[in-house]
Image: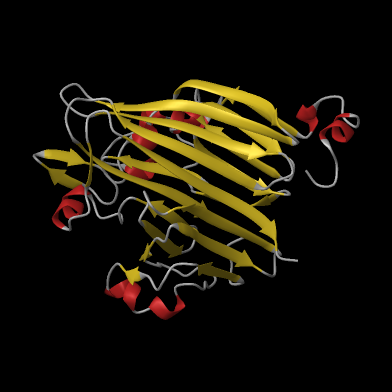
């Protein structure tokens, strides 16, 4: 906590909320109307959580500088969700969760259609709560909730999520547990679609990781493999490029902008998230880089099964995930 003890800090404020707070609200206009939101302001870090969208993270900024990519759709209520038209609900933001039994492009498996990136990110959370407490000298704010992905005669999966911040630290810590509450084995796929935009993303941004050389998705990505870690100004009609990294036990990927004096780092345990995707989309109006840990590349469940990468959750089985998004200065 900087160079100040808890007691020294509390002597200087009437309420700790002046330094770290959570404000619950409801959107009142446009396609977000009626959806819940939670604004978090903790030191230099500010972001908005969306309880009606898997408790995902929308806008994010550091010291007033936007760091997330927020798409042209804006925030869209899950009431408008159409499984076959995911991109009309894709506000992106800091985090869009994909899964829980499909990530990647549309596919048909066993006669059933599965849409782009699955449905969990358009599912409201329940038992949402905000907890504020001291852990020794650290002040911690945690928002928790549960999200069910269920269907009669289908899957019965549940995501239990907590998102935490500590005062004077610029880290968003995401802790997830996925449970198969059903009575049969279920296919399981999950991806953390973490998105960074301008001004953090610019011609001055550079991507570094502690993972090896990525595998390009296709020939279009392969031709630019040697420059996949650098970025240009927005290009007209740019077609996305995807690069697949193999995770290590303690994986990290860092986007640094020396001119801005700011970096963002995604770190996670690679044991349950064996892949990370770099989504390089430097087009006009869609100017974004995604750093996306996942159980699979975004290949769709049919291809994942054919490639021997489709995980199964047995009845009662749980899987735990920990992902952190950290911001800092370069000087």
Q: Residue placed at 85% from the left, 29% from the top?
A: 10
Quadrant of the rendering where the N terminus is positioned: top right
In front of the other: 111 or 314: 314
Compared to residue 109, the image places residue 136 above or below, namely above
Residue 286 showing in the rendered view: no
Quadrant of the rendering where the C terminus is positioned: bottom right
Residue 298 showing in the rendered view: yes
Compared to residue 32, the image places residue 282 above or below, namely below
Quarter of the rendering containing residue 117: top left
Q: Residue placed at 33% from the left, 70% from the top?
A: 215
Residue most toward the left?
111
Residue 212: where, in percent of width, then height?
41, 71
Compared to residue 14, the image places residue 63 above or below, namely below
Residue most toward the front?
136
In front of the other: 142 or 217: 142
Q: Residue placed at 41% from the left, 53% from the top?
A: 293
In front of the other: 319 or 64: 319
Tally the marks.
0
In front of the other: 169 or 49: 169
- Residue 215 vs residue 33: left or right? left
Q: Residue placed at 17% from the left, 40% from the top?
A: 113
Coloring basis for residues: secondary structure
Residue 67: where, in percent of width, then height?
61, 53
Residue 74: where, in percent of width, then height?
50, 41
Residue 176: where, in percent of width, then height?
44, 37
């Amino acid at each position: 906590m900087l160079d100040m003890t808890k007691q020294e800090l509390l002597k200087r404020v009437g309420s700790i909320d002046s330094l770290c707070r959570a404000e619950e609200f409801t959107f009142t206009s446009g396609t977000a109307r009626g959806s819940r939101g939670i604004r978090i302001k903790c030191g230099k870090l500010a972001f908005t959580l969306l309880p009606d969208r898997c408790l995902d993270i929308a806008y994010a900024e550091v010291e007033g500088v936007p760091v997330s990519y927020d798409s042209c759709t804006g925030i869209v209520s899950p009431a408008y969700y159409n499984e076959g038209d995911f991109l009309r609900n894709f506000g992106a933001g800091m985090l869009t969760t994909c899964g829980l039994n499909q990530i990647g492009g549309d596919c048909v498996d066993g006669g059933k259609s599965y849409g782009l990136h699955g449905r969990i990110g358009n599912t409201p959370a329940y038992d949402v709560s905000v907890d504020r407490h001291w852990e020794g000298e650290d002040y911690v704010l945690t928002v928790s909730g549960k999200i069910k992905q269920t269907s009669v005669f289908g899957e019965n999966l549940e995501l239990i999520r907590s998102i935490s911040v500590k005062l004077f630290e610029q880290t968003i810590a995401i802790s997830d547990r996925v449970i198969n509450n059903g009575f049969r084995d279920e296919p399981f796929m999950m991806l953390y679609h973490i998105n960074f935009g301008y001004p953090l993303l610019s011609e001055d941004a550079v991507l570094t990781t502690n993972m090896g050389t990525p595998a390009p998705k296709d020939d279009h990505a392969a031709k630019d493999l040697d420059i996949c870690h650098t970025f240009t100004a927005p290009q007209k009609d740019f077609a996305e490029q995807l690069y697949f990294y193999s995770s290590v036990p303690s994986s990290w990927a860092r986007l640094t902008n020396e001119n801005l004096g700011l970096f963002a780092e995604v770190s996670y345990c690679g044991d349950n998230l064996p892949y990370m995707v770099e989504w390089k989309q430097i087009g006009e109006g869609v100017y974004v880089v995604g750093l996306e840990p996942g159980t699979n590349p975004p290949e769709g469940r049919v291809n994942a099964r054919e490639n021997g990468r489709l995980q199964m959750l047995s009845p009662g089985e749980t899987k735990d995930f920990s992902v952190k998004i950290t911001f800092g200065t370069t000087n």
